[in-house]
Structures are given as structure tokens and as C-alpha cells.
Image (tube, rainbow, N blue to C red):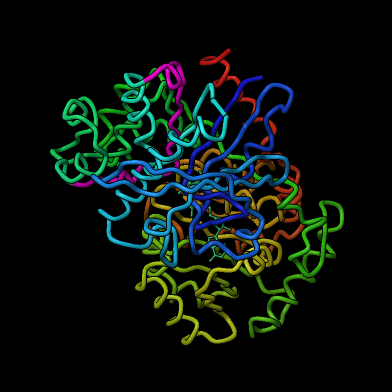
Amino acid sequence: MKNVLFVASESVPFIKTGGLADVVGSLPKYFDKEEYDTRVILPRYMCMKQEWKDRMEYVDNFYMEIAGQNQYVGIFQCVFDGVTFYFIDNEHYFAGFAPYDGTPDWNIEKFAFFSKAALSILPVVGFRPDLIHCHDWQTGLIPVYLDNFRYGGEYYRNIKTIMTIHNLKFQGVWDTKTVRAITGLPEYYFVPDKMEAYKDANLLKGGIVYADKVTTVSNSYAEEIKTPFYGETLEGLMWARSNDLSGIVNGLDYEEYNPEKDPMITYNFNVSNFRKEKIKNKLALQEELGLEVNKKIMTIGIVSRLTDQKGFDLIAYVMDELCQDAIQIIALGTGEEQYENMFRHFAWKYPGKVSANIYYSEPMSHKIYASCDAFLMPSLFEPCGLSQLMSLRYGTLPIVRETGGLKDTVEPYNEIEKTGTGFSFTNYNAHEMLNTVRYAEHIYYDKKRDWNKIVERAMELDYSWKTSAKHYEALYNSLIG
Ligand code: ADP
Ligand code: GLC
């Protein structure tokens, strides 16, 4: 049996702010249980729903030094869907209304504590991993601490590490002096070929330098981050580690996202009956959101964190033009105020046509994936993207920019060869996006049979974890075979 440990800052069903939680909560279920014992460590945030906290069982506690102080480390445990989750408890660090609440330096201290605690609880819970799979900057210190712990004892020797980059934009950067004081790591680590980048300390960089393998969540993004545009100042490092860097595209939890069984949608459907059944969801949602109830009109969905990553500048730029067309737009998301207000403004300007839902709701997200005809995701960059995979699964055709995982998972419709599962454009340009949306409108209104064929192909794709989990297994085996 090979012991694999995931350490991450979020995971469904316990806590979620984005796709990272979907990945961490679903991938461990798909490894061969005969060969791998996969467990997960998460923070025990105070903002987790009570129903989840109630399921956790107290295990033990001890004190650990961080930021020059002795801090309480509580351990809780819970088995969910056959996977063991451990939770690190500390009310000082994990209070707050959301996982990343607080100033940047506070977050660095919070996750330095988390990373060191994740390693420190292992002897206590009696799970010695052969490999630790780290996710994003919040766990970047783990490979570094592991390097440092090795001097301290046998227990941590030979534990392999993988660092998966879900988003290179967030790196956990703060001044070196403070990070040294917080982590307690020796000066040795704070030099440019280790954790230092441009005079500051960079937690993700530490993880990338010290991990045995580095992965990211699509092939295209793995290539893109070696260039200055996508490299977020670490492109040189990505080049330097390119022999150990690979892209493995995300999968979806096909049990959770299943139009045939999904309890969150109004009418269930599948690839053979979507022509009759899917449309009923559209009518129900139009009614619910106060849009014109009209089964003929093309509806375009958006479900997203509202940040510049997702291409909202393009949408804002041509929204007035787009709203002249025979379409409806249904947006769900929270984030930067300028984008929240942009959607509120257009919902006010075009009542019955634009619906702005500025909140977080899983059931509403499922309804949008199930009800709309198309899904708009014109990202500036997109490491993988799960929303387009969810849309494909529910026969809602993605309109995307050809970047990162969007490029790898959405095949543009080709009228001549009758292939493709969505629509795409190349440049980060608002009118290029608008033209592509209008081309999709043309197929929807004038070539309905072709449209339905695209839906059929989209729904028949397999973006479950089946294939990608095998790629991770192969990578694990290359280190701990
Ligand atoms: P990212 O991780 O960059 O936010 P992904 O496409 O990988 O992008 O994943 C986003 C996840 O968050 C999807 O599961 C999506 O449905 C969900 N999501 C985003 N915004 C909301 C919202 N307002 N309400 C419900 N779910 C949301
Ligand atoms: C990040 C990326 C997104 C990816 C998700 C899960 O949040 O922005 O593209 O799908 O992580 O890997």
C-alpha cells in the first residue's frame, strides 16, 4: 500500500471558494484503493458550516512553535465518501468569515502555521505518507519544511513531494525578514535559488524549488507559464524545472455533476432526451429569475469568481452591443466590486434580459449549468477551469477564449467537418469575443439541428477523473514505485 497525503486550503464538501476545492475533494476518491491509501489535511475554519463541524471527531492536541510563539494545534478527523480527512484546529488563525480573510501577511502566517502543523501531526495520527501532494501557495512551505525537518529526524526522511499549481497568480509573497521570523527557517533558505524572489520571500517558489515534481492543471497552462505573459515573474523558474513539470488536466466528479440524477436541478435529463427535457429547466429558471419566459430565446450563463482573470473586462466592454441581440444573460458570482456593479447595472438597464445574481449558491450554479444554452468564459488566463467542464456535461455549450485548460477541453465547432463541442476565439479582444458569441447565436437560431448535434457531442465527452487520476498515479509511481 502506498500512502499519499493531500494538503490543501480548501476541499468540497467542507469549504470552497473555487475549483481547487472541487479538485481536492474529488480526485482522492478516484485512486485505486487497493494500491493507494489517500488522505487529506485541511484547516478547520470557523466559517465551515456547523453540519460539517459536527461530523468531525476530536483526535488530539499539542503545541508547536510558529512566529516565535507556542501555538495550539488541535486535530480533528472525519471520513467522507471513503476518504479520511484530518483538520487542523486553531481559533487564532482559522477565525474569520472566509478562508483567506485578513491582510496578506496574516495569510502568510496562517498558512505557514498550517503547513508546519500538517507535517507535525503525522506522527500523532499515525499516518506516514510516502508522498505529499501539495496544492498552491498555501502549502508551498511543506517541501521546504520537509527539507528542513529531515535534519531533525528519520521520520521525515524520504517523503516525496509534488507541488500542483492551480493558479500561478497567487504566490504568497512577503518581505524576507517577516517570513523568516514567522517560519523560523534558517537564513540558508532565503536566497534567490531557494525561497527568495525579487528580494522578497515567496512561499510558492519554495514549494516549486523543493518539490520532487511540479504539475499544473492542463497541458497548455504548463507550457504557457514558461512565458512572461503567463509566468507571473516565475517563468524562469518554470523553465529551470521544465524537466519535472507536467500538465494533468482536471476532471469532474461525475457523480456530483450528473444531469440525469442531479437533485439541485428542476428537471433531470440525459443525452437522449435533452431536446425535450433540458428546455424545461430554462423555462423554470427564467420564471424564477424574473426574465422573459420564452423557450426560443438563447440564454447565456456565467458562473464565476468575479475577477479580471475571468475576462470580465471584455464582457463589460461589449455588453451594450450584446444586449441588442435576441439573447438573455444569467450571471452568478461574487468578487471585485467593479464587476459586481457592472452586472447590477446591466440588469437594471435591461430588465427581463439580464439577470445579475451577486451571491454564492451551489444550487443556483447547477441550475445555470443545466438551463442555459451557452456558457461564456472568456478568461484572460485559465489554468484549467471546471465551469466549462460542468457546462459541457449539462449540454450547455461553452464560448471560451483559447487559453490554458479552456483550449485543451473545448473543441471549437467546425461547420465543414461537423466536429467540435463549443465555440472559441484567440485574442483577448472584446469584439473578437462578440463575433464568436454572434456566430454561436447564428448556429443556435439558424441551424438548430447542428446545434443539437454539438450538444450531443458535448454531453458524450468524458471529463470524469478516470483518465487524469491514472496520470497522477503514474506520476506517484515514478517517485514511490
Ligand atoms: P476558479 O477555481 O478559478 O474559480 P474553476 O472553473 O476551476 O475556476 O472553478 C470554479 C468553481 O466555483 C466551479 O465549481 C463553479 O461552479 C464554482 N463557483 C464560482 N462562483 C460561484 C458562485 N457564485 N456560486 C456557486 N458556485 C460558484
Ligand atoms: C484555479 C484555477 C482554475 C482551476 C482550479 C482547479 O482556481 O483558476 O482554472 O480549474 O484552480 O485546478
- Identify whether 299 is placed above or below 161: below
Please provide percent x and percent y for residue 187. 16, 29
Q: Quadrant of the C terminus?
A: top right
Q: Nearer the viewer, residue 346 or 133?
A: 133
Magenta span includes 154: yes
Looking at the rendering, the quadrant in which ligand 1 lies is: bottom right
Please provide percent x and percent y for residue 250. 57, 39
- Identify whether 218 is placed above or below 424: above
Q: Which residues are magenta?
A: 153-174
Residue at horizontal 32%, vertical 62%?
102
Residue at horizontal 39%, vertical 61%?
307
Q: Nearer the viewer, residue 470 or 292?
A: 470
Please provide percent x and percent y for residue 177. 14, 42
Please provide percent x and percent y for residue 206. 30, 32
Left or right side of 204 for 262? right
Magenta span includes 157: yes
Residue at horizontal 59%, vertical 42%?
411
Quadrant of the image occupied by residue 232: top left
Quadrant of the image occupied by residue 290: bottom right
Q: Quadrant of the N terminus?
A: top right
- Identify whether 1 is placed above or below 90: above
Q: Tag count in the figure?
A: 0
Left or right side of 179 for 115? right
On the question of residue 406 being in view, the answer is: no
Left or right side of 289 for 318? left
Q: Nearer the viewer, residue 444 or 365?
A: 365
Residue at horizontal 41%, vertical 65%?
96
